[in-house]
Amino acid sequence: MEKIEEILHYWFDDIEKTILPSERLEQMWFGDSAAIAKETEDKFSNDFMKALRGDYDNWNETPRGCLAMIILFDQFSRHIYRETGQAFRQDDKALQLCLTGIDRQYDHMLSLIERAFFYAPLMHSENMEMQYLSIRAYEILITLSFPEVRPLFERFLRDAIKYNEIITKFGRFPNRNGRLGRISTPEEEIFLKNELGKTE
């Protein structure tokens, strides 16, 4: 479907041809750019709301459609609702799409970089079991990748390990506390002050 491909092209651009992400993709995937957040909101907030209403539920029936929905709920949500609690409100939806897709082996029908974002809801989950699945998923991507792109997938794995360590220690992501109205523990306050690693 045209809209699915529009979303995926925006998120992945031509990375399959260039091997490593462009400066724009670096900012969109790993940075915190207000400009990119605004661009994403302008381009796709309407699609985000349609997906939220269930208008795109039939996308779940194909691997690329499922991936586009995950991008909407797991990634675009974080850009559109940057620095607010709403950024994380669709994480459960994204996680369910990911788990159902894995069960249907949708992930095996995608490229490795597409799979990296297909698995992102596992990494973003505050559930310990999902964290372990995340690490395993990124370990597999590294074994499947060519040497020239392996550093990119190693980066995803490093993030997954970092997130897992935070959930192991706190049972949640402390950086979300303020935006979700949660009271930080003294230990979490120390962690946040030390800025040991941003998590989203």
Image (cartoon, rainbow, N blue to C red):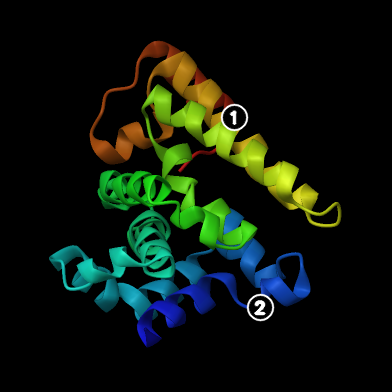
Mark 2–mark 1 distance (CA, rounded to whole Å): 28 Å
Q: Which residue is mark 1?
A: 162
Q: Which residue is mark 2?
A: 14
Q: Position of residue 60 (x, y in %)?
A: 30, 63
Of the 4 image quadrants, the one containing the N terminus is bottom left
Q: Secondary structure at mark 2?
A: loop
Disc 2 vs disc 1: which is toward the camera?
A: 2
126 relative position to 21: left or right:
left
How many numbered discs, if any? 2
Where residue 95 appears, x then y in whole percent? 34, 45
Pointers 2 and 1 in contact (CB under 8 A)? no
Residue closer to the observer: 22 or 53: 53
Can residue 200 be seen here? The reply is: yes
Q: Taking 127 as reference, is 200 above or below it?
A: below
**Quadrant (top left, top right, bottom left, bottom right) of the C terminus:** top left
Circle number at residue 138:
none
The kind of residue on which mark 1 rests is: Lys
Left or right of 14 in this view: 63: left
Q: Residue at x 41, y 45 (%)?
A: 121
